[in-house]
């Protein structure tokens, strides 16, 4: 079974990928900085979960392209 994420994590991740898809990579540390820069999320836990969700989405997208 996969990870279950709340809708606000997914919707924020999708919104960031739509608006800034060219800057996000599969590097978690860089994505944490970008999530902090482009959102007003104050919680470190939520920031990390959004950054992790974005990394996961990009990895799945790369696998499906192959």
Image (cartoon, grey):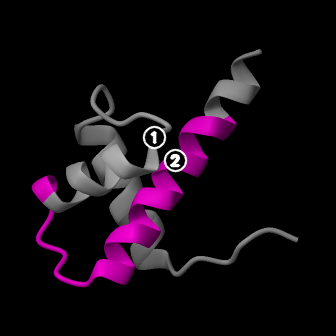
- The label shown at residue 1 is none
Q: Which residues are magenta?
A: 37-60
Residue 37, quarter of picture: bottom left
Does residue 46 appear left or right of residue 53 in this picture?
left
Nearer to us of marks 1 and 2 is: 1
Q: Are marks 1 and 2 in contact (CB under 8 Å)?
A: yes
In the figure, 15 relative to 27: above or below? below
The residue at 70%/18% (across/down) is 65
The residue pinned by badge 1 equals 27
Q: In whole angstroms, how far apart are the C-alphas of marks 1 and 2?
A: 7 Å
The stretch drawn in magenta includes residue 6: no
The residue at 88%/71% (across/down) is 1
Closer-to-camera residue (51/15): 51
In the figure, 42 relative to 37: above or below? below
The picture places residue 64, in percent across and down from the top left corner, at 74, 27
- The label shown at residue 55 is 2
The residue at 58%/77% (across/down) is 5
The residue at 25%/84% (across/down) is 43
């Amino acid at each position: 079974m996969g990870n279950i994420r709340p809708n606000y994590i997914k919707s924020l991740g999708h919104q960031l990928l739509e608006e800034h898809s060219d800057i996000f990579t599969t590097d978690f540390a860089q994505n944490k900085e970008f999530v902090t820069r482009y959102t007003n999320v104050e919680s470190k836990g939520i920031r990390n979960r959004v950054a992790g969700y974005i990394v996961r989405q990009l990895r799945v997208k790369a696998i499906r392209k192959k």
